[in-house]
Image (spheres, rainbow, N blue to C red):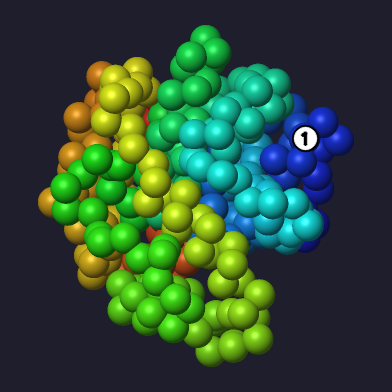
Amino acid sequence: MTATLARRDESRWLHSLGRQDAPVDLVCLPHAGAGASSYLGWRPLLPPNVLLHAVQLPGREDRRSEPTCPDLVSAAEAMAPWVARVAARRVFLFGHSMGGLLAYELAAQLEALGRPVVHVIVSGCLPADEPVRRRRIAHLDDAGFMTAIDRLGGMPGELSAAPRLLALFLPTLRADVAMAEGYLAAARGPISSPITAFGGERDVLAPWAGLREWRHRTSSGFAGRIFAGAHFFVTERRPEVVSVVRSIIEGTDG
């Protein structure tokens, strides 16, 4: 059967794909400007024992009439109770780019609620206080902002080739970039969940020298995995990326 997005009645934040009685919950957080549909292609690649929850942030797709989140911490605070309520089994978090920072903050919020997750996978992003992070660009005018995004490899190819779609996408993208740039987690102690960092070998936004600093943001284990490709390796290498996610889940059975 073809997978479709089906929103759970109890939450606008989570779109769930798979068996509701699956013993494993995989919560996936989108990159800047993206929505829950960016993870639709993951469902056919996951086993039936994994229930996929694609996070839907305000200001996009079926929540486009809502204002975007003012900052990353408030976004995590708003969704954490819903994740704690819906994902009642073994929870894994995955986030790409801005979604990686959000996954880390969400893990910390869930831990504060007494619901630590099994594992956090951060993809294509550096820790918030990592000194090699890129310069701030959210304040630039439209032309300068888009030039900077494109130069850094942070623009999906399909958007670069569609000006009208890009015009609709730009305000949300800018708001999300500002949210990521404003996030500082230096005062927060390490989370208790293990962290795995994914990176692209040609990703200038998240080079390995910065990715490996995630090892200081956990009191448990750390691992890293580099994939062929640039910043959007997560899309270009989707089957391989999901296969590694599956291996992480299967390696922590119990």
Depth check: 129 or 47 in front?
129
Binning the other alpha carbons within 10 Å of mark 1 as few (below 14), some (14 to 19) or many (20 upward) gives some
Reading the image, the residue beneath label 1 is 11
Query: What is the residue that sits farthest to the left in this orientation?
Result: 209
- In the image, residue 16 above or below residue 222: below
The image position of residue 13, as x and y in percent, is 70, 40
Question: Could one spot residue 249 in this view of the protein?
Answer: no
The image position of residue 150, as x and y in percent, is 38, 79
Depth check: 117 or 185 in front?
185
Q: Residue at x 23, y 54 (%)?
A: 133
Dot 1: element: loop
Which quadrant is home to the N terminus? bottom right
- In the image, residue 69 above or below residue 117: below
The image position of residue 73, as x and y in percent, is 49, 34
- In the image, residue 149 above or below residue 246: below
- In the image, residue 7 above or below residue 227: above
Left or right side of 9 for 12 = left
Q: Residue at x 59, y 88 (%)?
A: 163
Q: Residue at x 17, y 53 (%)?
A: 132
The image position of residue 46, as x and y in percent, is 58, 47
| Residue type beneath disc 1 | Ser
Left or right side of 76 for 86 = right
Query: What is the residue that sits farthest to the top in this orientation?
Result: 114
Query: What is the residue that sits farthest to the right in this orientation?
Result: 9
Question: Could one spot residue 106 in this view of the protein?
Answer: yes
Quarter of the rendering containing residue 25: top right
Quarter of the rendering containing residue 141: bottom left
Q: Residue at x 27, y 31 (%)?
A: 186
Depth check: 31 or 41 in front?
31
